[in-house]
Image: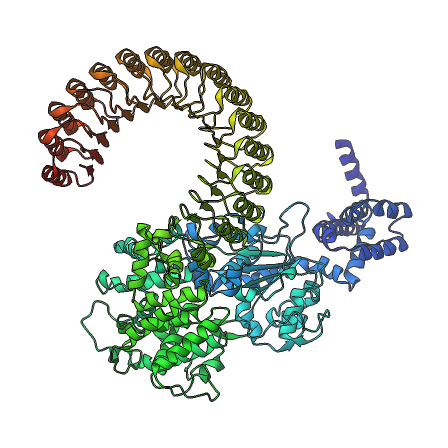
Amino acid sequence: MEKKTHYDSIMDRSKRIMWQDDCYVDLQSTSSSQSSHTVTKDISWINKHQDQLQRFITSPFLEGMLTHLKKVGVLSSAEETRILKAGQIQDQVNTLTTIISGKDAQSSDTLRDFVEKSDCPEAQLILNHDSMVEAHKGVLLRRYEQHRDRDSISCSKLDITSRPLLLVDGLSDLQQKEHDLMQVGATRGGKRNHLRQLGLDKLLEPLTRVSLPPRVSLTAGVAGIGKTTWVRHFIKKWSQGSVCTDVSFVLPFTFCELNSLEKLSAERLVKLAFPHLTEPSLVLGGSCRTLLILDGLDEFHCTLNFSDAAPCSDTKKEVSIEDLVTNIIRGNLLPDVAVWVTSRPGVASLIPGGLVDRVTEIPGFSPADIQIFLDHHFSEMDYASKIWAHLRSHKILMVMCYIPSICWIVADTLMYIMQSETQENLPRTCTELYAHFCSMRAEVGEPRGRESVKMEQLHGSNRKLFGNLGRLAFYGLLKHKYTFSEQDLRAYGIDLLSIQSSLGSGVLVREESTMYTAYRFTHLTLQEFLAATFYYVSSKRAIFDLFSESTMSWPKIGFQNHFRNAFQHSQQAEDGHLDVFVRFLTGLLCPVALKPLAGLLTLGKDDGNQKPWAAGFLQSHLAGGGCVVSLRAVNLAYCLQELQHTELLRSVEEDLRLGSLAGKLSRAQCVVLGYLLHVSPECSEQTNLTGSLNYTTVKCLLPQLLYCSHLRLENNHFKDDVMELLGSLLSAKDCHIQKISLAENAVSSKGAKALSRALLVNRTLTSLNLRNNNIGSKGAKFLAEALKMNQTLISANFQNNNIEEEGAQALAEVLQCNRKLVSLNVQKNLIGAGGAKRIAEALKTNRTLTKLILCSNQLGDKGTVALAEALTINQTLLSLQLQSNSISNRGMTALTKALRLNHGLVSLNLRENSIGVEGAKNMAHALQENNSLQNLDLTANLLHDEGVQAIAGAIKVNQALTSLHLQWNFIKSSATKALAQALRSNTTMQLLDLQENAIGNEGVIFLAEALKTNSSLHTLCLQGVSAGTSGAVAMAKSLMTNQTLQTLDLRGNAVGMEGAKALANALKSNRSLKSLNLQENSLGMDGAIFIATALKGNHQLTYINLQGNGIGESGAKVISDAIRTNAPGCMVDI
């Protein structure tokens, strides 16, 4: 290498000619340098555009390129053939660039010249794509930077990335037909439990490896849920290169912008919105991936007509704006451009489902999210906890806070009131709250905590503005119009300068871009509230129908006539868009709600009769109507709540709480119950309608039961006709029911068949309880067939249904193919050994079932042997219950052998069998080897001292068992001594149950000694063990040193006064015991007083039972009062 360098230097020197002293002219160096520079430049051009060449070259463009390169001699025929045989178009381009890069500079020049001189869009993208994209991203970032403060919650736990979209099958009937707040109220803001989450980065991705990316995506969400915030966040992330990096251009439009346009082409639309994109055809042509965002379809003033719109596929052809949007969504225009539409659900349903490839929802705030939100923004002076406490006690406000923008309104308003008034004055209804909000916006900047100020003086400048805003809101609401131009504002007498005031800027939001300027109310509910204030004031003096703005109508005189008219319009509105308006209108009849608006409304003198009249009007409508309770009817109960006329609501809620609704459910009560299903705390976790319903009331409430998550319909004497109704309920697309209990009814195989049909299509139900019905083997077969297909049910309870061996066989077939079922209860079904064998065979292959209950099924030893064999293979079953199955030593021998090999079973219930001493010894051998079993129940198994001593020996070495039940086993003190010795060394046992064994004082003393050193036992059950004073004294001494025992049960013994005295002394120093049961122990008054006074210094005891100790009623009161005084946190039964 060094020789070559030296040789080159000599050759270079020989090329030089002397010109002057030490000056040379290099004859070849200049041209050589230029040539070298050109080669580098051309190669770097290819390298620089390699990605664009592979991405944008199409087959026709490549074909023309190869023809040209071959014609000018750059490529040979062999090279052309090699390129064409390379495979996919990207591989062909890669082969071409590799060949050209290996040739001289002239070949690279030829390739570059061909691209630069071509007028094809592919060539333009190859040359200009990156610069166009970067410029476009810069424009978008600058444009959306102004929204950062408004959109940001500034809380990392609640930002967009922590609340991904929810993938849904489509819009439900509730979403398509009901008002936003009714949707939120009916579902309590909850989401269906089977929804898949979709993050920003997956928005345009295919869901599976074999599916295609969506062309039209629809994101639906109620007003204020954050659709526009999501869009802006996506645009920022895309512009920063964080998401969807394969998308070249994102073109966001709002329907507010499109409202300002009439007729134009697709290309002109892009030019208007994005002037920097000088060649829209490059962006829209399909050569690069483009996303078109259409945000806020519900704000579009035109109606999309997908059936009659004239087809248009020419991007240069001018059409009406509604036809332009329609053709884009249908795919006639811009078929290669991805489209993302956002909308409120009701309007989104106007797009035919066949045109939408993907539907997503935006989740709102959960109760936990609301708490995080409050803690983050309202932490000063403990406002967050006070606001949270108020929301918890007023569920209707809590449910509204599911919507983030309403959460802001509610929290801001409550904090403002807290800063100036006492908490007793906090609003209890939505009308009150919005009245305070408007008052607050009018008072912004005024000093708080001031003395009384004349409201007329304070609000005088805002009264006219407030009235005009109300008129704008009302007539906008009637027209489904939610955005307004400056011309609209002037038409309703609103001066543009006036909306810059604190009231104007507080209720109206200004939106502007290069194409438009528009205004909207802070939230839809605020528009509805202002509309209600306008109607309330105007109806007192109007002589014509206020619903007819510009046309004459029949005279309507008097507030009550106008009030009836508003409700008539509301009840007739198919989409429920006037529901919340009439709630606010009713709420304004309550003087408490009107008070904050005193300076903003021109109010005449109220005679005080309107509120009781309205209450009677609403209640009369509750009793009328059809047999089925619709959400229109439920809205009447919401109105009663806003009116704060709640006698009927409270009465039904009290009956619901007490479980005394049976026989009381008239139609009016059913309507109120439908309302309570939305807002009552009694229905938040579960809806308990046990013993309350019949066929008629179920049919009446059916649409409202749809949205309960946990439904208890036990002991209602339901027959198969009700199952037909409930089957239709569970089959509905809107179904939110996750758990349903139909225990203690009269369901037969016919009813089971109706339920099975529902299970074939239901995708929400996770738990089905049919305990104590009579479905029989035939009904079990119907349900089993459904469970083979169902992919959501995880718990099934068929206890006491007489399914017998044939039904067990059907369920065994389910276990062989179902991969979702986790818990199966077939207790008390006479399945016998044959049924057990079928289930055992299925367990050998099943890997999902974790809990199996086979109690009281006459399994015998044969069935137990079969199950034992399965346990040697199955390692996923965690709990097996075999109580009352006539299992003897033979069955135990097989079962304990299996336990030596099994490492999965955690809980084993063998209560009330007959395993005897030998069975206990076998179990002891198994426990010495098994290290997974934690809970063992051997109650009533004739173990005697010998059997228990064997088990005690195993406990010394076993370090897995935490719970051992040995009651009713004829155990005496010798076996208890062995158990006590085991407890000295055992460090895992937490519960020991020796109830109803005659261990006597001696046995209790042994256990007490063990407790002095044992530090693991938490619960010791010694009910009815023939213990007396000496045993109690010994136990008391151990409690002075033991600091781990939490529950001590000494019921039914003879502790006596002296024993109580000793225990009382122990309680003064013990700090671990939480529950002490001394029921029926002959304590007498003195013994009970000892216990009561001892609690003065004890801070851990939370429960004590002193019943049946001969204290008497007067003594019981004295002692109960003493305990409550000394230990107010301790519950006492006496």
Query: Residue 739, how many percent across, how many down?
Result: 46, 45
Give the number of marks. Answer: 0
Q: What x and y, as percent, mark residue 625?
A: 44, 68
Tell me: residue 527, above or below residue 933: below
Return the residue nearer the eye: 868 or 665. Answer: 665
**Residue 19, visible in the rendered structure:** no
| Picture layout, residue 1010 above or below residue 55 | above
Image-quadrant location for residue 1010: top left
Quick one: quadrant of the C terminus?
top left
* Residue 966 appears in the picture as rendered: yes
Return the x and y of residue 342 as percentages of the image width and height.
55, 62
Residue at coordinates 22% horizontally, 61% vertically from top-left?
A: 424
Left or right of 49 on screen, residue 462: left
Frontmost residue, 778 versus 186: 778
Left or right, residue 1108 beside residue 296: left
Residue at 62% across, 68% down? 276
What residue sits 22% from the left and 16% below the top?
1000
Check the image and report above or below for 1071 versus 151: above
> Where is 281 relative to 1100, above or below?
below
Q: Nearer the viewer, residue 218 or 82?
A: 218
Colouring used for the render: rainbow
Residue found 57% across the figure and 47% down from its top: 757
Please state, as top left, top right, bottom left or bottom right, where the N terminus lies in the image: top right
- x, y percentage for residue 352? 63, 64
